[in-house]
Image (spheres, helix red, strand yellow):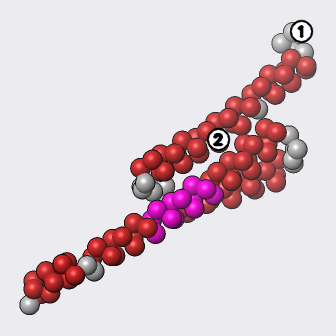
């Protein structure tokens, strides 16, 4: 095989095709674990991650090689993980907002606030 041999070039391209297949889902899983471990969604805007998911689905549709494992995993697999990031971020934000609202309206805080206002 020489450098210009189409079969060796095809083998190289096939191997290179697995790089985003591993990196894109792995990067999303890293973010997912970071959010879950911290219990806070700081640094993970639901809008941004939703846009990433939509972009990956659109990329899958435009590539056209719909049964190739590299394409399915790197686009649709990553999109599913990104939707999980969005769901977790929204859930954590809702629970932190609810707990903040509950603590702001607690009787002790309300009484102190009333005294200060008078």
- Badge 2 element: helix
Mark 2, other Cα within 10 Å: few <14 / some 14–19 / many ≥20: some
* Rendered position, 97 above or below 87: below
Q: Position of residue 57 (x, y in %)?
A: 74, 55
Disc 2 vs disc 1: which is toward the camera? 2
The location of residue 65, given as percent across then percent down, is: 87, 44
Per the image, label 1 sits on a secondary structure element best described as loop
User: What residue do we see at 49% from left, 55% from top?
Assistant: 44
Q: Residue at x 72, y 42 (%)?
A: 74
Q: Quadrant of the N terminus?
A: top right
In the rendered structure, find residue 1 and report the number of the disc placed on it: 1
For disc 1, the neighbor class at 10 Å (few under 14, some 14 to 19, many from 20) is few
- Label 2 vs 1, first from the N-terminus: 1
Percent x, y of residue 17: 76, 32
Q: CA distance from mark 2 to mark 1?
A: 32 Å
Q: Which residues are magenta?
A: 83-94
Q: What secondary structure predominates along the stretch shown in magenta?
A: helix
In the picture, measured across the screen, residue 96 lies left or right of residue 108, that is right
Q: Can residue 52 be spotted in the picture?
A: no
Given residues 1 and 44, the one toward you in this image is: 44
Q: Are marks 2 and 1 in contact (CB under 8 Å)?
A: no
Seen in the picture, residue 83 relative to 38 is either above or below; the reply is below
**Going by the picture, which residue comes out furthest to the bottom?**
118
Residue 109 located within the stretch drawn in magenta: no
Residue 101 shown left or right of residue 2 in the figure:
left
Name which quarter of the figure residue 110 lies in.
bottom left
Q: Is residue 106 left or right of residue 95?
A: left
Camera sees residue 22: yes
Placement of the C terminus among the 4 image quadrants: bottom left
Residue 7 horizontal/vertical position (percent): 91, 19
Query: Looking at the rendered structure, which numbered label has been put on residue 24?
Result: 2
């Amino acid at each position: 095989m020489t450098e210009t041999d189409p079969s060796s070039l095809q083998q190289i391209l096939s191997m290179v095709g697995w790089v985003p297949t591993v990196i894109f889902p792995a990067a999303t899983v890293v973010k997912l674990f970071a959010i879950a471990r911290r219990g806070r969604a700081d640094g993970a805007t639901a809008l941004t991650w939703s846009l990433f998911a939509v972009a990956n689905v659109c990329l899958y549709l435009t590539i056209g090689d719909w049964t190739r494992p590299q394409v399915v995993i790197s686009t649709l697999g990553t999109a599913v993980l990104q939707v999980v990031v969005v769901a977790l971020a929204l859930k954590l934000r809702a629970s932190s907002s609810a707990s903040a609202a509950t603590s702001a309206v607690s009787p002790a805080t309300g009484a102190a606030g009333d005294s200060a206002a008078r």
